[in-house]
Amino acid sequence: MILTDNGGTTYTPCPAGSYLARCIQLIDLGTQTTAYEGETKRARKVFIAWEVLDDECRRDDGQPFVLSKRFTQSLHEKAALRKTLAAWRGRDFTPAELKGFDIKAVLGQNAFLSVIHADKDGKTFANIAAAMKPPKGMTAPLPGTEPLLHWSMAEPDWQVFAQLPPRLVDQISASPEFKLLTPPKSVTLPAPTAPAAPAQAPAPHAAKPAPAGSGFDDMDDDIPF
């Protein structure tokens, strides 16, 4: 849950508080091995990242803060992923949704993040305490600028894989699911888009509609996506 590891580059952590953010990365990490208090566990993990949409909360270099969290891929009633998705959607899952929820529906959706600080080994880290449904009528003061990245072992997009930070690439590559894939010898990345000119007065931004039945578009008090 350490959120300021940006490929070895150190930045001032995102200030503690609550922020509107946009989900920009949904990365299948495959089966990962973790050790805690002498016990080793193996579980399928997913990495979710959000871009903070706040014009008064930016990194030292002017770029948006990107916060992330890893979850076990489970919709069990006690699973952290299910609790987070339920709070984010504003309701729990129906029995029908539990039989097959396409988590890709969260990509590009806004969330209201609660960020807290934690100290470890003399460093301060920004952690996501909760991801909730945005309050009714809340709009983003800044448009999202980070690209949306989705990596799935079931349908590997090698252009996306080539854009992931080395830390994530190493973790994914160590998974047994990845070892069954056949990566291409080379990948041609799309040409980078030119950065948008700074806006004098940013207009409220809303993401595009989620796919029908995603759970993000069927509630009367949803803000427009």
Image (cartoon, rainbow, N blue to C red):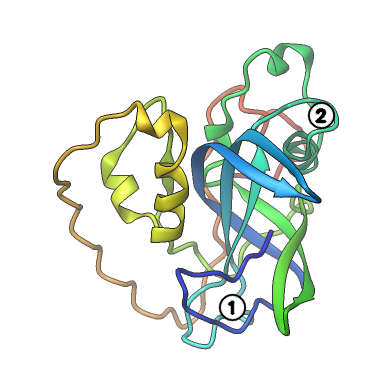
Q: Earlier in the sequence, mark 1 or mark 2?
A: 1
Q: Is residue 47 above or below residue 77?
A: below
If the image is split into quadrants, where does the N terminus sit?
Answer: bottom right
Spatial separation of the CA atoms under disc 1 and disc 2: 32 Å
Q: Give me the residue at 78% from left, 40% from top.
A: 80
Residue 214 is situated, as x and y percent measured from the top left of the image, at 61, 27
Which of the 4 quarters of the picture holds residue 92? top right
Residue 123 visible to an observer of this rendering: yes
Identity, as a three-letter code, of the amino acid under mark 2:
Asp
Three-letter residue code for mark 1: Asp
* Residue 70 point in image, percent of width and height: 63, 48
Position of the C terminus by quadrant:
top right
Q: Residues within 10 Å of mark 1 (few under 14, many from 20)?
A: few
Number of labelled discs?
2
Query: Mark 2 highlights which residue?
Result: 92
> In the drawing, what numbered circle is on residue 55?
1
Q: Secondary structure at mark 1?
A: loop
Q: Residue at x 53, y 38 (%)?
A: 209
Judged from this view, the residue extending furthest toward the bottom is: 60
Picture coordinates of residue 97, whole percent (x, y): 69, 17
Which quadrant of the structure image shows residue 94?
top right
Residue at the outermost front position? 38
Callout 2: SS: loop
Q: Is residue 16 visible?
A: no
Indicate the position of residue 101 as horizontal and vertical percent values: 62, 22
Question: Closer to the camera, 38 or 105?
Answer: 38
- The front one of 193 and 178 is 178
Q: Is residue 171 left or right of residue 189?
A: right
